[in-house]
Image (cartoon, rainbow, N blue to C red):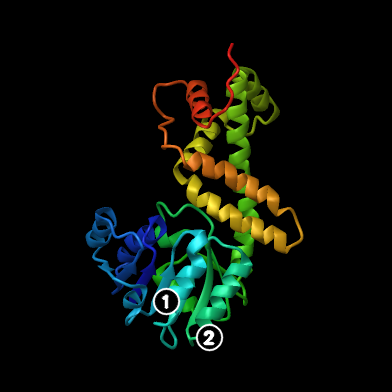
Amino acid sequence: MRIAFIGFGEAARAFTDTLMATGHALSFAAFDLKRDPTMTEAMRARGVVQAATPEAALLDADWIIAAVTADQSLVAAQSVRAGLAQGQLYVDINSVSPGRKQQAAALIEARGARYLDMAVMAPVHPRGHATPVLVAGACAEAVRPELESLGFSFDVVGPAPGDATAIKMVRSLFVKGLEAITVECALAAAASGVYDRVMPSLERSYPQLDWAADVPYRFERTLRHGTRRAAEMREVGETLDALGLTGGLAREIAEVQARMGALAASDLSGDVPLPEVVAEIARLRGARIRES
C-alpha cells in the first residue's frame, strides 16, 4: 500500500511514524511547500520519498492524506486534482468548516476519486494515526475494513462530507475558546497587578480545575500551536456564520491564538514563578502594565 501526504508537518509525521510501526507493507511519498533542510531531513529519516510536485506525490498512491494548514486545505485539493486517478482515496484531515470540506469533496469526486472527511479529535502525539478520529463521506463505510486493518481508532458519523468536521468545529469553539479565555484572563490579571488575587479566587470558584497545572498548560499550547489554531478558529467562525450564529466570537478567539503563536514559545516549567512569566508575556503582547 502506498500513501501520499500533501503537507508533511506534525500530523503527517506522527501518522507516518505509527503507521510504519504497524508491520504492514507500506511506502510513503510526500509533497510540502517547505523544501528546507529540516523538511528534507524529516522525510529522509522516515524513508519518505520527497516529491517535487503534488502530482508527483500521487503517482501509484492508494491513499492521499491532506494534512495542511486550514487556510490551505482547498488549495491542496486543487493542487492534486489533475493528477488524481480513478478510485484513489483522498483523506482530508484538515481542521476546516463543513462548507470547505464539501468544496474539496466536489473537486476530488469529480475526478472519480473517493473523498473521506476525517476529523482528528485529540493531539496526534503519542498515538499518531491511532488518535481518535471521526470519519464521514459516501465511501466511509466502504473503507471501514482498511481503517480497521491499519489500526485507526475511528467512528463513522455520517454519509456526507462535512459531517465529521462539523463535530470538531463546534467542539473547538469550546476547547480553543477556553484556552483563549484562560490566557487573556491571566494576562489581564498580571497586567493589572492583581494576579495573586484573581487566580486564587478562580480556584475557589472552580476547585475541580487544577489551576497550578492548567494555566501553564494552556499558555504552552497557545504559544506552541497558536498560529495553526488561529487558522482553525477562523474556520470555526465560518461554520458559525453559516449556522446563523456568532462567528465573530470564534474570530476573536483566533486573534488571541494568533497573538500568542507569534511569540517565541516560552518554557513555563522552569524556575521562574508563573506570575512573573505571565507578566513578561503580557509585556511582550503589548499590554499596558499597571505599575505597583
Residue in front for this viewpoint, 283 or 240: 283
Compared to 6, does 205 lie above or below? above
Locate the N terminus by quadrant. bottom left
Q: Where is residue 112? Give x, y as percent.
A: 49, 87
In which quadrant of the rendered view does residue 46 lie? bottom left
Mark 1 neighbour class, 10 Å CA radius: few under 14, some 14 to 19, many 20 or more? many
Tell me which amino acid carries mark 2: Ala
Q: Earlier in the sequence, mark 2 or mark 1?
A: 1
In which quadrant of the rendered view does residue 241 lie? bottom right
Instruction: Read off the residue under disc 2.
Output: 110
Q: Residue at x 42, y 76 (%)?
A: 80
In the image, which disc is placed on residue 80? 1
Residue in front for this viewpoint, 159 or 219: 219
Q: Where is residue 272? Give x, y as percent.
A: 42, 21
Q: Where is residue 96? Give x, y as percent.
A: 57, 62
Tell me which amino acid carries mark 1: Val
Residue in front for this viewpoint, 250 or 119: 250
Contact? badges 2 and 1 (CB < 8 Å): no
